[in-house]
């Protein structure tokens, strides 16, 4: 996701009609691409769906296809239907609340909890817990299954998630995410070590053709396929030596990653691409056995093999409060299971 200008930028209000006049420099652009740039809180998929439902007009004439070219000078109008009532049931699930006020809430999510309902995880989600904790005070912009949800982390990733209690807070948070104006730090424990040890990886990510559950780095640098993904990473600590390799090839490493963009599985894909898949990752770590040498190698290998999830933790979330302007910085300590894994690796 790239930075976008403020010109005519708005954020979603249930049941509203958005209006925008196409400038001359938009001529020749796809209409869905142009509207995503103009309204960053609306995803391309949502805009395409609204166009398919006949919700977009240009000079009062329906726009038939998302791929149609922008007509410079035309007055576009996009009708946003009001969200349906939230379907998930409130559940009295204990939450570790890190910050909360009348506008938003930051929660330290445990492993095994999905952020929102989806096939196979309809109950026990963060949304179910928030519905009970916040009663009716959740933004409706996320729609039926995702009230209050502005962003998400994977079910088995631990750490900080912010949710909006009001539509105004949701719009403001969406704007911060679109412009990369949040400080987000993750800690990961990986097999091997990335090469180079620290740096920035900027690629495009697209859904894998071999496995639709996975995402992959687009190999053709000139391609516009997929979405831009930028991860800054540092090696905090490395452990032991990888068996069968020359000196200087660690068996494992402890990393800090900071996101400039927030794509699905971004850190998991990027670290695997750098040759350091996250320990316990069921999608991107398969086929890469942990191999170390030393007197405690078997003990470390057993700890790695027993780790039940991807060793990834959303540790820091900082942002300017979208309503009050207050500087918010939330931190979550490394969870006990990752601390135990680090202790075993440090004995290598």
Image: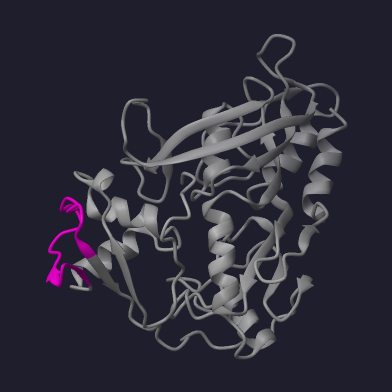
Kindly tell me whether residue 335 is visible in this rendering.
Answer: yes
- Judge whether 138 appears above or below 283 on screen: below
Q: Is residue 219 left or right of residue 275?
A: left
**Magenta residues, start to end:** 56-75
Q: Is residue 110 left or right of residue 26?
A: right
Q: Quadrant of residue 329?
A: bottom right
- Judge whether 112 appears above or below 301 on screen: below
Residue 317, position as x, y percentages in the image: 72, 55
User: Residue shown at 19%/60% (left/top)?
Assistant: 74
Q: Who is closer to the viewer here, 43 or 94? A: 43
User: Residue shown at 64%/26% (left/top)?
Assistant: 199
- Judge whether 23 appears above or below 14 on screen: above
Extreme-top residue of the structure: 246
User: Residue shown at 78%/53% (left/top)?
Assistant: 337
Q: Quadrant of residue 144?
A: bottom left
Magenta segment: does it hold 70? yes
Q: Who is closer to the viewer here, 159 or 261? A: 261
């Amino acid at each position: 996701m790239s930075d976008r200008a403020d010109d005519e930028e708005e954020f979603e209000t249930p049941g509203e009609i958005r209006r925008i006049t196409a400038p001359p420099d938009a001529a020749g652009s796809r209409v869905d691409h142009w509207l995503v740039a103009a309204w960053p809180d609306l995803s391309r998929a949502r805009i395409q769906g609204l166009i398919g439902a006949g919700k977009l007009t240009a000079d009062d004439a329906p726009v038939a296809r998302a791929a149609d070219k922008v007509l410079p000078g035309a007055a576009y109008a996009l009708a946003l239907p009001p969200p349906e009532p939230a379907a998930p049931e409130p559940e009295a699930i204990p939450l570790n609340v890190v910050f909360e006020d009348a506008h938003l809430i930051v929660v330290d999510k445990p492993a095994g909890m999905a952020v929102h309902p989806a096939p196979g995880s309809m109950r026990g989600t963060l949304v179910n817990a928030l519905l009970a904790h916040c009663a009716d005070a959740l933004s409706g912009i996320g729609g039926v299954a995702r009230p209050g949800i502005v962003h998400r982390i994977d079910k088995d990733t631990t750490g900080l998630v912010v949710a909006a209690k009001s539509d105004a807070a949701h719009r403001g948070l969406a704007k911060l995410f679109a412009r990369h104006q949040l400080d987000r730090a993750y800690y990961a424990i990986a097999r091997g070590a990335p090469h180079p040890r620290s740096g920035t990886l900027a690629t495009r990510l697209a859904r894998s053709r071999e496995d639709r559950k996975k995402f992959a780095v687009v190999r053709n640098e000139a391609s516009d396929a997929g979405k831009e993904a930028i991860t800054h990473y540092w090696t905090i600590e490395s452990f032991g030596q990888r068996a069968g390799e020359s000196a200087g090839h660690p068996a494992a490493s402890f990393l800090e990653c900071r996101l400039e963009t927030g794509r699905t599985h971004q850190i998991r894909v990027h670290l695997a691409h750098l040759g350091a898949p996250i320990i316990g990752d069921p999608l991107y770590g398969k086929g890469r056995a942990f191999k170390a040498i030393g007197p405690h190698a078997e003990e470390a290998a057993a700890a790695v093999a027993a780790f039940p999830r991807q060793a990834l933790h959303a540790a820091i979330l900082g942002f300017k409060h979208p309503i009050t302007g207050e500087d918010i910085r939330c931190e979550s300590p490394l969870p006990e299971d990752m601390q135990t894994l680090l202790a075993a690796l440090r004995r290598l």
